[in-house]
Image (cartoon, coloured by chain):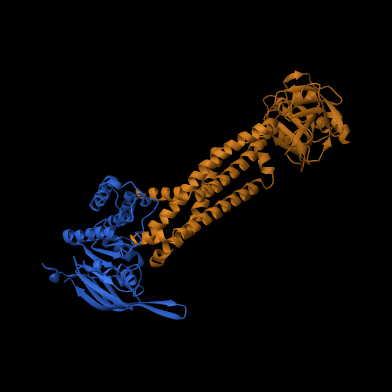
Amino acid sequence: MTFNVPTLIRANIFQRRTRAAIAILAVAIEVTAVMLLVGLTSGTINEVSGRIQALGADIMFRPAGSSPLLGLSDTTMPTSAVDWLLEVDGVDSASPVMIWTTSQVADAPTNMFGIDPEPFEWVGGQLEILDGRRLQSGYEIIVDRRLASTEDLSVGQELEILGQNWTIVGIYRAGIGARMMVPLPTLQEILGLPNKTHVVFLKVDSGTEPSAVANRIGQELPGYESTLMAQYAEVLRENIVGLDQFNGAISSIAVVLSFLVILLAMYTSIIERTREIGILKALGASKTYIMRTIIGESVLLCSIGAAVGVGFAYLARWVLVSRYQTLSVEFTMEWLIYAVLLGLAGGTLGAFYPALRAARQDAVRALRHE
Amino acid sequence: MTMDDAPSILRTVGLEKSYDLGRIKVRAVCGIDLAIKKGEFVSIMGPSGCGKSTLLYLIGGMTNPTRGSVFVGDTDITHLSDSERTALRRERIGFVFQRFNLFPTLSALGNVRLAQEIQGWKDRKEAGEGARELLGWVGLADKDSRRPYELSIGEQQRVAIARALVGMPEILLADEPTGNLDTDNSLQIMRVFESLNEKHSQTILMITHNPEIAARADRTIHMRDGRIVDVEGKS
């Protein structure tokens, strides 16, 4: 690009500051929306799968057709499944877990595990108690440090969940399983599902390949599904129906939004600058030159908007995570680039028609335009 | 070689331009035959709406005639495509307007450099020097960083002339260049034109309403109702 286009473009942007600010803001909002949305979904998936994988179990066993996204499925199986599983060659230990999702403790829905503490630790769920003691029985509850910090919870405090008062007896290091854990029999009783469980976590014998054990379980216990914990994040992502489509739809709406705002901004700008376009034509400016000038202006606006949007996204993440500490927002370089490209694409496309219209304007009429 | 021997640099043959305004057809230019020699300074006079500006735009290739031809040198520009006429304007014709038509967002230097950029000047240093030289030539060397609104109207018109002279076009078309100026500024502009014409043999075709201004040209063409009705030579 030659030297004076940026001068004219920059001058146009500075002369029409309100219009430029609105266009920049529209692109910034688009980039922020895409980054936050994708960051929130992938952050949540990675955080949840990370916590489940941190249990240390090798296999998650559940009824066929139930969701691997814990807390979303009501399908249960008898706890006697644990006995069947322990008979499968290669299974070292098994821990039944019931899951309940509640919004009574934090702003966001939070999972609560009903566990049998001993087998839970055998499969790898090493809960490091930071304050108080381990779970025993009855209406006792332990919460992780992150939830305790966010909701200002402490040992001895009572929580009302499922119409019962639960006493916090311990606070454990965050990052394993769910944010709250209660004794399995108590949760089964309250839910009216005695001797039932949603999932069973399995540990395989040392030196045994978990996939081989999972295949064996599949053959011996048909009607159930075994998910290898090493692949849990991937399975989770695949099972969240419509996630990609949802992200795609929001991204598309964002692109259309920036496209329309830039289209309107550049179109009105072209109408305002009709006479200037006439002057350019009188000076011998080619159609390509005029289009390049207008599209260049839009690209500059969109580039500033994209940069501002990235800044907004990081600021919004900081605000969200400060306000809702259980939320996870993860930005990846791939999506950052994608969001910026979407902003630029929307803006460039939006400027194309006004640029074409300007380039095609009749020079004499443009010069006579008041 | 005297002016009389010089070849025509600009020629129109049976030039006509009509506009359709709804049911009414307006004939802005009606069969104009005109020849202007290289280095000639010609003024055009006539009442408002007589077709002077339309003639200038036809000659500058800004619009196509309904009938007839415009020759710039040996090239019949009416047979050129829009982009070819744009290129011809860029390379061979300079425009000066009554309303100056400067870009308000650019400085005096920026306005001249914009024209350089349109002409494809690549070398920043050379372009900067060239632009400053042109501004110096019209007496604005010390005001190159000023925006149009920081200049007097006479100075604005001189910036417009400097811009039109980028690349030293063969033909300078001026549409009432002194129409918005007071007497002093008008005389300054005319001195610039005369100097250009005398020292650089610049061909100039200028529209004016002012008989005193018109009289400073080599030849004055009088138009009425789209036609040439009289031609006067310098006495």
For the point 24% across and 78% down, the residue is B230
Residue furthest to the front: B183
Q: Which chain is orange?
A: A
Residue A342 seen from this side: no
Give whichever of A8, B189 is nearer the camera. Answer: B189
Quarter of image, res B62: bottom left
Residue A144 drawn at (x, y percent): 73, 26
Which quarter of the image is occupied by the C terminus of chain B? bottom left
Left or right, A156 with reference to B152: right
Where is residue A112? Give x, y as percent.
78, 32
Q: Is residue A146 above or below residue A8?
A: above
State left or right for residue B37 relative to residue A271.
left
The answer to which image quadrant residue A224 occupies is: top right
In the image, A76 versus A173, the foreground residue is A173
Left or right: where A97 falls relative to B206: right
- Locate the N terminus of chain B by quadrant: bottom left
Indicate the position of residue B20 as horizontal and vertical percent values.
43, 77
Q: Position of residue A208 (x, y in %)?
A: 68, 28
Q: Nearer the viewer, residue B221 or A334?
A: B221
Q: Is residue A71 above or below residue A145?
A: below
Question: Does residue A80 appear in this view?
Answer: yes
Q: Which chain is blue?
A: B
The residue at the point 56 percent across, 41 percent down is A335
